[in-house]
Structures are given as C-alpha cells and as structure tokens.
Image (tube, helix red, strand yellow):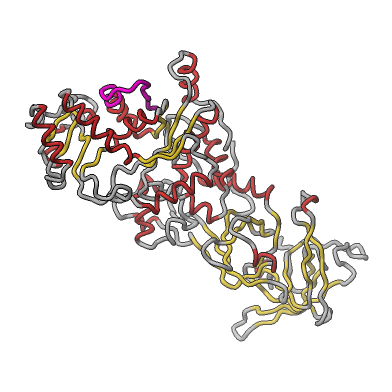
Amino acid sequence: MGETNSNFIHDVIDKDLAEGKVKEIHTRFPPEPNGYLHIGSAKAIWINASTAKKYGGKFNLRYDDTNPVKEDDEYVKSIEEDLRWLGMEPTGGIFYGSDYFDKCYEFAQKLIREGKAYVCDLSQEQMSEYRGTLTQPGKNSPYRDRSVEENLDLFKRMKDGEFADGSRTLRAKIDMSSPNINMRDPVIYRILHVNHHRHGNKWCIYPMYDFAHPIQDGLEGITHSLCSIEFENHRPLYDWVVENVGFEVSPHQYEFARLNMTYTVMSKRYLRKLVENKIVDGWDDPRMPTLCGLRRRGYTPTAILDFISRNGVSKNYSVADVRYLEYCVCEELNETTQRRVAILEPLKVVITNYPEDKTEMFETSNHPKKPEWGKRELAFTREIYIDRSDFMEEPVPGFIRLAPGKEVRLMSAYILKCNEVVHDENGNVTQLMCTVDLETGNNKPVDGRKVKGTIHWLSASNCEKCKIRIYNNLFNKENVATLLEEDTFEEFLSDDSLVEYTDCFVEPSLKDATPDERFQFVRTGYFVKDSKNDGVFNRTAPLKSSFKPE
C-alpha cells in the first residue's frame, strides 16, 4: 500500500483516540462518477485507505452521485475497478450518495421547520448580486423571511416537479454578512429535471455537495472526513450542517494538499476535453494521468503508491516532478522484469561465412542479477536484425558499436565484423554484409583482442513483427496547469508525445505476452503489451530516469 509514515492527519487521530473522542477510525473516498480517476485521486484514496488500515479501522467507497448531469454507470464501474487495481479494498463497504436522498430531504425539512432554511426565488444572477464580495457583505434575499409553512409547501412542490429548473432553490439561513462567502445563505437544493443514473426520474431536486456530503459522512459513521485543501473554506459550512442536522457521533473534516505534477493536467474538465476532441485515444490513453491510462502504459500500483508516499502528506502547495514518478517505476521494474530483445529500427545483417540452412541456439539470462530466474534461448541464423542506431557508416569519435571494418560483440553470441555496406539508389543503407568469428560463440577471442561494444540482435527468421510506441509528456510546459484558460490547451501540446515505430521485431515468445506482463527490452526501456491493440508494445519508461531523489 506504500509506506504510511506519520503525518499531521495521524497526529490529529492520535490525539482524538487519546482523548476518547473516537473509538474506531472510519474514512471514506467520495469520487463523483463523472470521469475516470487520475493519479491525484490515487493520493486521496491512499491517504484515506492507509489511514484506516494503520488504525485498524474501516474505509468506504462512496460515489458522490448527487449531480446527475454528467454522471454515468461507465464511470461508476471504472472507479471501483481502479480502486481494486490499486489494492485499496473498501473494507467498510461501497455506498452511493444518491441512496441518502430521502434522508437529505428529511433533514432539509427539519431545517425549514427550525427556521434555518428557506425557499428562494432569486435567479442565479440575482443571487450572485445579493451575495456581495470578499470585501463587501451580502444582503438578505427578499424571500428570506417566508413562513415555515410556506417554505415547507414550496419545498414539497419543488420535489413534486411543479417548478422549472432554476426557478427556485432551497437555501440555508446562516449569515449574509459572514466573511466566508460559503456561509452567506448557501444553496442546499436545486431543481434539475434530469434522469439519474441510479434512481431514474424519482427525483427532480438534488442536494448540493456541501449539504449532502456531511450528512452522508454522519450516516455512515465517518470519523475523519479527509479531503483536498480547496474544501478548507467549506469546512465551516460542513460543521454547520453536522451541528444543525444532529448526529450522535459527529464527523470532522480535515484537508490536505492536492497532488500536482509538472507537465500534467489533473482537471477532469480538461481531461474530458482531451478525450472529446480526440486529442488522445480515450480516457485510457497512456499519455493521460488517469489510473487506467497509467495501467495501460505499464505502471504498477506499487510504483504509483510509492511515488505518492514519498511525496508525503501536508497542507502546503507543492508540485511534484513527473520524473519522480518515472523514477519510482524504473526502480521497481529494474528488479521485477525479465529481459527480452526488441529491435525498433531494424537493419538487416547478412553473415556471409555462416551456413544458410543452420540455426544455432544461444542462451541468455532472463535477468543478469537473478540467476534463479534461469535462461532462455535465442535462435541465431545467417540473416539477423540489429538496431539501425547501432551502426554508423562514418562513426563519430567515441562510437564503439558497429562500423565498416570494425568489430562488435553480439549479445550472448559471436563477435561480428562489418565488411560491406549495401545502399539503395538514394544512398540509404539497406543491408550490411558481415562475418562472425566462429571461435567466439559467447567466448573471448582466442587471440586475446579486445572488442568494446556489445549490441542486441534477433534472427530474421525467428522473430515477431510488431509496433512499438514511445510515450513522452503530453504537454510541453512544466507549469501547464497554471497556464490553462478556457479552450487554450492545444498550444501547450507536445509534438512528440507519441512516437510510433511500425516495423519492429521482438522475440517470438512475446507474441503470447499479456497486458499484465512487463518486460525490460534490453538497452531500450521498460515495455508492456497494449491492452487494446494486439501486436503493439507501449513504453512504460526509459531504462533510467533522469530524476535523482534528494
């Protein structure tokens, strides 16, 4: 689950337990099912789930499905799938905010009867005018002093579908002069004649999040409602609802800083635009910060949670380096992946002193530092492929791979010498004519000469053709999240966020690989088979991240 080091939230819980305020810790993760979870969501999940686990408590998954406009069962299903993939089992159960609509309605009636809520006829624009500003107090709605009887009647008629969308709201009666604008008679119910993904057309009024959320927490027995820092100014309203609704054990809200990353956008609104405008291949595009996108790219739950854990829990705003996430997955995959050979840009090599009808098998290790993982065999034939980047017709100083008249070691096989370069009519190199030192099959030259470079290779007749996709940052600005404005993200898109190699070759065994298996392609990086396209491999990360943790 990632390391659970002590943090300010645990300090609060330790104090609450010591003072006897709570007996069993109960947390929850309340996502709105209007999109797919991203790595920022994973931080909230980890904080809530790991906290409950540390104290032997319970952890709920509760869908915040109180706004039916953009919610969908597709997202409901994906959220639970992502949660379980992370290994964050909802030990307290799975709940839906919409299943508490009856109780929310009852509590709203209670507030009306106690003179703490009223039906308001102001439009959204008028309400904004009445609300005031950060420096000026608001003014009371002309409907604020309606009688209890009239409010109860109007609220029931709102529920019964008598009024149009936006024509009336139910507002909490708090304080229009409060320095906290959230406390200036906030709307707690609005009219929406929209079909709900779970309850159909049973309801045409829906509670606002700030009203429904504390009620849901109270009904489920949540002790510590842990949420991101943007809800800090909403906490007085949370406490007001809890106090005025009345619960035996009152939940309390605590806020932590969100996860922000360089070159990354976390806003669901922008992620949805990327999908709808077909800039990416769906929510699970491997360039997306969504959990399904990271999974398709080959990231592991343990690497993601390790990254989140290392970044810590605080209330202070910070931006994590996206390379740190890459570092965490490289660190893990270096230890856990078997090695395989892939040729991204094949260059054919004909070995003129090797028999045409001969196939020889050479053993090579599945992991150079794990002999217990055993070895596999690579077929060697007269014609092989090497990577084009391993040959230079006019080598630059320091180039120690293959060049005309030069020798190089073929990984786990012979020493190869380039004798002739074949060009097409445009002068492009199409083929190399070479020889091998037949005395050096996985052995040192008998004459003691030293050959510095080692390159990987595949038999031209014993390999599998495929496509290989190299993914880079989707955005070209480190601080892109702070630069975005409405519909302007296109100018910040990277030109090389996806580089596809279409005529690649891999070892034959990779034909049967599954999207759950990750491999190190030797000298190239870490790869996984694409879950949506057969014969395609996605790069998870390069061999080494350029990031170095402090």
Q: Locate residue 503, reporting x and y percent.
A: 60, 73
Q: Quadrant of residue 87?
A: top right
Quick one: 378 or 260, which is closer to the camera? 378
Quick one: 113 or 377, which is closer to the camera? 113
Q: Quadrant of the C terminus?
A: top right
Give the residue furthest to the top.
19
Q: Locate residue 281, reporting x and y percent.
A: 44, 62
Magenta-tinted stretch: 240-255
| 26 relative to 415, above or below | above
Q: Is residue 241 magenta?
A: yes
Query: How many numbered marks does the figure carry?
Result: 0
Tell me if residue 59 can be seen.
Answer: yes
Tell me if residue 128 can be seen.
Answer: no
Q: Is residue 378 magenta?
A: no
Q: Locate residue 46, reporting x and y percent.
A: 50, 37
Q: Quadrant of the N terminus?
A: top right
Q: Locate residue 538, reporting x and y percent.
A: 56, 60
Q: Quadrant of residue 492?
A: bottom left
The residue positioned 10% from the left and 38% from the top of the image is 121
* In the displayed structure image, the side of residue 89 where residue 267 appears, left or right: left
| 238 relative to 357, above or below | above
Give the residue furthest to the bottom.
425
The residue positioned 24% from the left and 27% from the top of the image is 180
Give the residue furthest to the right.
446
* In the displayed structure image, the side of residue 419 where residue 59 appears, left or right: left
